[in-house]
Image (spheres, rainbow, N blue to C red):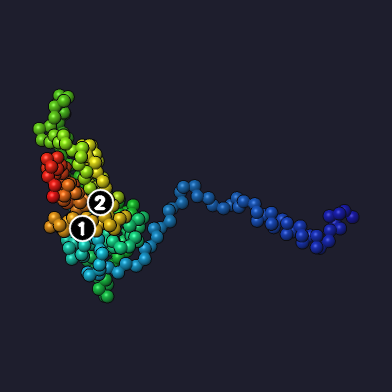
């Protein structure tokens, strides 16, 4: 009789246990691995937000037909064209300021008087802005420009950059997803003007500072960016208006 045939029941049990342990330790070859084709997990839901007409510390961002964003502090101030899709944020809370946003429909109220609010991934909000801007540009794009003139000739309407802007610092209040905010910063830097960008969503103090400057200049919240050129408060990004403010600042004008 061989040794295997003489194995005791206890020995067989111990051998089976070893086989099970080794099998458990071995990699699972049939385990499905992420090869990059697995759909991303759905965006996390934010904690409920009670949004009412009298909610305090509220910032509401709505989108116009051109794809530009505007900021209001009360639901009543959002115009009809933007009420169906409004981003909501509370300046004293961090929820809804990062990868997932609160989006409200100000055309619908629940029986308790609160507006309907849902969660939306940041990338979906940004894609919506880009699409609306692209649609607007497609409708209003001018005909192709004529060939440029001889090298060195400047456009008649191009304002000359003031020579004394080296000491001017401009503050831009905006948000990371706001394309005009980035355009304003790039425009200033191309002129050699120092620009400080303050994110009103990431920094509640910056949001309060912006609102204080708007109040002192007797202006309401509108399109962001809000631009402070030595006390001259501009609502929205307009190259022409910014050039005029820079010219005044270069001349020593402060407000």
Residue 128 lies, with reference to residue 248, above or below; the image says below
Front residue of 148/217: it is 217
From the viewer's perspective, is 106 left or right of 38?
Answer: left
Residue pictured at 25% horizontal, 51% vertical: 174
Q: Secondary structure at mark 2?
A: strand
Residue 133 shows in the view: no
Front residue of 16/113: it is 113
Residue pictured at 67% horizontal, 54% vertical: 23
Q: Where is residue 3? Give x, y as percent.
A: 86, 54
Residue 212 shows in the view: yes
Residue 189 lies, with reference to residue 93, above or below; the image says above
From the viewer's perspective, is 172 left or right of 45?
Answer: left
Q: Where is residue 27? Give x, y as percent.
A: 62, 51
Residue of label 2: 174
Q: Residue furthest bottom?
A: 112
Residue 254 lies, with reference to residue 218, above or below; the image says above
Q: Residue furthest top?
A: 150
Q: Residue furthest left?
A: 156
Mark 2 surroundings: few (<14), some (14-19) or many (≥20) residues within 10 A: many
From the viewer's perspective, is 205 left or right of 228?
Answer: right
Residue of label 1: 211
Query: On the rendered image, what quadrant is the N terminus found in?
Result: bottom right
* Occupied quadrant, residue 166: top left
Image depth: mark 1 or mark 2 in front: 1
Residue pictured at 16% horizontal, 49% vertical: 231
Q: Secondary structure at mark 1?
A: helix
């Amino acid at each position: 009789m061989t040794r295997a045939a003489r194995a005791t029941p206890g020995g067989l049990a111990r051998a089976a246990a070893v086989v099970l342990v080794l099998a458990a330790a071995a990699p699972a070859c049939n385990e499905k691995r992420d090869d990059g084709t697995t759909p991303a997990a759905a965006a996390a839901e934010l904690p409920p937000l009670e949004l009412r007409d009298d909610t305090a510390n509220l910032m509401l961002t709505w989108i116009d037909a051109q794809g530009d964003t505007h900021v209001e502090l009360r639901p009543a101030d959002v115009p009809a064209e933007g009420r169906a899709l409004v981003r909501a944020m509370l300046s004293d809370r961090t929820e809804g300021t990062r990868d997932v946003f609160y989006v409200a429909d100000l055309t619908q109220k629940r029986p308790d008087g609160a507006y309907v609010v849902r969660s939306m991934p940041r990338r979906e909000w940004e894609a919506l802005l880009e699409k609306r801007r692209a649609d607007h540009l497609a409708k209003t794009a001018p005909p192709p420009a004529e060939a440029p003139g001889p090298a060195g000739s400047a456009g008649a309407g191009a304002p000359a950059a003031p020579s004394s802007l080296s000491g001017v610092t401009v503050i831009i209040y905006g948000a990371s997803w706001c394309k005009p905010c980035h355009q304003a910063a790039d425009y200033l830097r191309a002129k050699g003007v120092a620009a400080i960008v303050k994110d009103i969503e990431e920094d509640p103090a910056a949001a309060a500072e912006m609102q204080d400057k708007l109040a002192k200049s007797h202006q309401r919240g509108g399109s962001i960016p809000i631009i402070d050129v030595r006390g001259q408060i501009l609502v929205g990004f307009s190259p022409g208006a910014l050039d005029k403010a820079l010219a005044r600042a270069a001349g020593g004008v402060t407000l």
